[in-house]
């Protein structure tokens, strides 16, 4: 028994050390980086030559299509953090350029979301603080639209505070993702069945899946969560899948596989969020 307890304490200490190293070396969201940083990363890769070559080819293809990227901390919350940051940044840009329709639509969704998720089984007293944090963040975007550069800098700082806005809003985005799935279980259940049949897992219903894989912090995000959050906000989420493979595009041109979730609405003016996926991780592309 004592040996088991000692091992448990050692494991806790190791996990705490790893977490501390991640926090000291990775901000929640990085400054804007040139896309060449991606090429450089794989040019210096010491992994298996064939795998490295595939990622290097993919990074060069992406560099021909995008100009910048923003890295997100790899703590299991990267999709939600990337979505949150990109959403706020996009809304701020629209507001400062006199395009307020999409901001008004998103703001309405956020403000009305508390009563909606409570109809799906969540306790208001449990989630109200996290809801208010997201409301405050979205309202903040409308506080001063005269200087986009200053507001961007302030927004970046706000979303990089440890144990603060980013974490609170990230968890509330998880709630919204789960609520979207619970609101239309027949729509999302086939995603679960497809994922589980390929891995041989026993099928879960939507509430069980949400309690295990969506709501807890640090749980990585799969295809079904990506689709649900995109549809909840009515935005388009475009993801470049960088997994070392390339596919043929129009005219036989090589490209990185790209998948789109959600939609752009009837008017074609809905916001588009563009992310880079590498196995187990998401960053933002520009």
Image: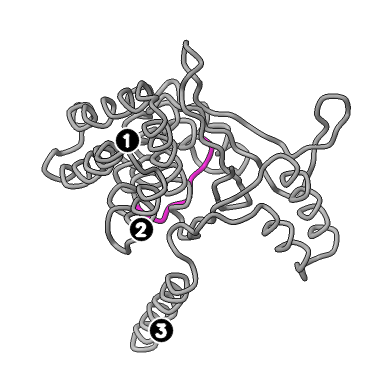
Looking at the image, residue 71 sits to the left or right of residue 141; the answer is right
Q: Is residue 100 above or below residue 32?
A: above
The N terminus, quarter of image: bottom left
Say whether disc 2 or disc 3 marks the residue closer to the N-terminus: 3
Q: According to the image, label 1 marks what residue?
A: 176
**SS assignment at label 3:** helix
- Residue 223, x across and y down, in percent: 53, 37
Give the class, few, some or many, for how many residues have Cα within 10 Å of label 1's Cα (few <14, many ≥20).
many
**Residue at image point 43% right, 31% down:** 228
| Range of residues picked out in magenta | 217-223
User: Quick check: is 191 in the magenta stretch?
Assistant: no
Q: How far apart are marks 3 and 1 (CA)?
A: 36 Å
Task: Tell me the tag on residue 199.
Answer: none
Main SS class of the magenta portion in the image: loop
Q: Which of marks 3 and 1 is in front?
A: 1
Q: According to the image, label 3 marks what residue?
A: 10
């Amino acid at each position: 028994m004592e040996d088991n307890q000692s091992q448990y304490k050692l494991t806790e200490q190791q996990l705490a050390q790893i977490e501390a190293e991640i926090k000291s070396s990775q901000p929640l969201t990085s400054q804007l980086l040139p896309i060449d940083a991606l090429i450089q990363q794989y040019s210096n890769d010491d992994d298996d030559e064939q795998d490295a070559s595939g990622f290097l080819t993919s990074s060069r293809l992406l560099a021909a299509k995008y100009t910048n990227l923003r890295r997100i901390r790899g703590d299991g919350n990267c999709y939600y953090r990337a979505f949150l940051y990109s959403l706020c940044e996009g809304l701020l840009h629209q507001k400062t350029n006199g395009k307020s329709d999409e901001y008004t639509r998103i703001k309405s969704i956020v403000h009305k979301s508390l009563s909606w998720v409570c109809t799906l089984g969540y306790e208001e007293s449990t989630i109200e603080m996290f809801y208010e944090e997201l409301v405050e963040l979205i309202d903040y975007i409308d506080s001063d639209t005269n200087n986009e550069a200053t507001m961007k800098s302030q927004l970046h700082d706000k979303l990089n505070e440890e144990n603060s806005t980013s974490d609170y809003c990230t968890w509330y985005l998880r709630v919204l993702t789960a609520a979207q799935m619970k609101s239309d279980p027949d729509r999302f259940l086939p995603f679960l069945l497809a994922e589980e049949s390929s891995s041989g897992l026993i099928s879960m219903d939507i509430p069980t899946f949400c309690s295990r894989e969506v709501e807890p912090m640090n749980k990585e995000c799969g295809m079904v969560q990506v689709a649900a959050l995109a549809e909840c906000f009515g935005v388009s989420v475009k993801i470049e899948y960088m997994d070392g493979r390339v596919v043929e595009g129009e005219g036989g041109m090589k490209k990185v596989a790209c998948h789109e979730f959600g939609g752009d609405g009837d008017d074609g003016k809905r916001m588009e969020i563009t992310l880079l996926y590498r196995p187990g991780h998401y960053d933002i592309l520009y």
